Amino acid sequence: MGRSPCCSKVGLQRGPWTSKEDALLVKYIQDHGEGQWRSLPKKAGLLRCGKSCRLRWMNYLRPDVKRGNITADEDDLIVRMHALLGNRWSLIAGRLPGRTDNEIKNYWNTHLSKKLRSQGIDPITHKNFHLPDGENIFTNNFPKKKKTKNKCNMEAAEKTTKKNVNVHIPKPVRFTSSTSRLFFLKTKNNSPHDQSLSPGPGDHSSNNSGDNGLGIFIHGIHNNDHPVDDGGSNDLELQADHVPPEPLNKSDLDKIYEEYLQLLKTEDNCKPKVDSYVVSISI
DNA sequence: AAAGATCGCAACCGCGGCTCC
DNA sequence: TGGAGCCGCGGTTGCGATCTT
């Protein structure tokens, strides 16, 4: 609905960005701030489409982008977050400061999926190939990173330079009934675009809704006085087939949260370091 | 040393949600 | 209420770099 072509391709530059283009984009954003991507190229004197400008800024030029050297802890966290969230790269990136969804997506596709396979784990379901149905790597108390001698793990080990990963702290959020309904409807339909799961604050391409939208995250904060990261587990997705398209109620949230809490208990390094959040929930 | 294969990552593309009018 | 426009997300592609034979 109302979708227009990203840009008329006629006369626009494509492919790799030049340093001159980078400079123009950076200068413009420094002067005018982010946003208005569609009109930005023209104003900045760039022969690029707005999408291309946004992508370049978000993934490469933004000053807080941390490049390279994904640590073993980050690596581990990505795997765990992926088990909970699936291919929601922006959500995962939101928990890793300085990492972009594109970077994590690439890292997953080129390193982690292979690594998991080499460990006998299905990178899609996160189930051990040898486990009975229904037992994923988490319900089976996924062991600490198993170091093998394959290339990926050796690289990961080499890249490890710090011990603690600071999990990005989510914003206070509003959780609306429409959002929760959407969540179940979309999950039930197994849509790859579950946009009710909005990015955390680390995702600078924050969504339009302003909702974080995940009951688990909100509920965790609400009840435990320490922030709990958000997550819609694979288990949740599997259960979604028999979940009616109703708003999340408290028992739903309790159930999801309990599952996630179990995970967090095994993940000391990932505990955020603040005590409480103010959240607004309206269901 | 050269050619072919594979890898890694930046960038592109299309879809869908949200806001505004 | 619904169309138009904008934005962000996730999947895919293209190509340079690196590895293997």
Image: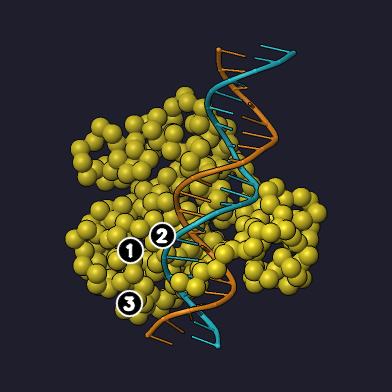
Chain colours: A yellow, B cyan, C orange
In the image, is A5 to the left or to the right of B16? right
> Which residue is more in the foreground, A14 or A239?
A14
Q: Which residue is mark 1?
A: A186
Q: Secondary structure at mark 2?
A: loop
Q: Residue furthest right?
A: A20
Q: Please say if the residues under marks 1 and 2 sit with CB atoms less than 8 Å apart.
A: yes
In the image, is A215 to the left or to the right of A202? left
Comes first in the chain, label 1 or label 2 = 1
Q: In the rendered structure, which amino acid carries the disc numbered 2?
A: His
> Which residue is more in the foreground, A236 or A193?
A193
Q: Secondary structure at mark 3?
A: helix
Comes first in the chain, label 3 or label 2 = 3
Which residue is drawn at the image coordinates 27% and 73% (left, top)? A247
Q: CA distance from mark 3 to mark 1?
A: 14 Å
- x and y, in percent, of residue A210 in the image: 48, 73
Q: Which residue is mark 3?
A: A177
Residue A95 visible? The answer is: no
Near mark 3 (Cα within 10 A), the count class, few <14, some 14-19 or many ≥20, is some
Q: CA distance from mark 3 to mark 2?
A: 19 Å
Q: Which residue is mark 2?
A: A193
In the image, is A273 to the left or to the right of A6? left
Quick check: A252 above or below C12? below
Which residue is drawn at the image coordinates 55% and 50% (left, top)? A102
Q: In the rendered structure, which amino acid carries the disc numbered 1?
A: Lys
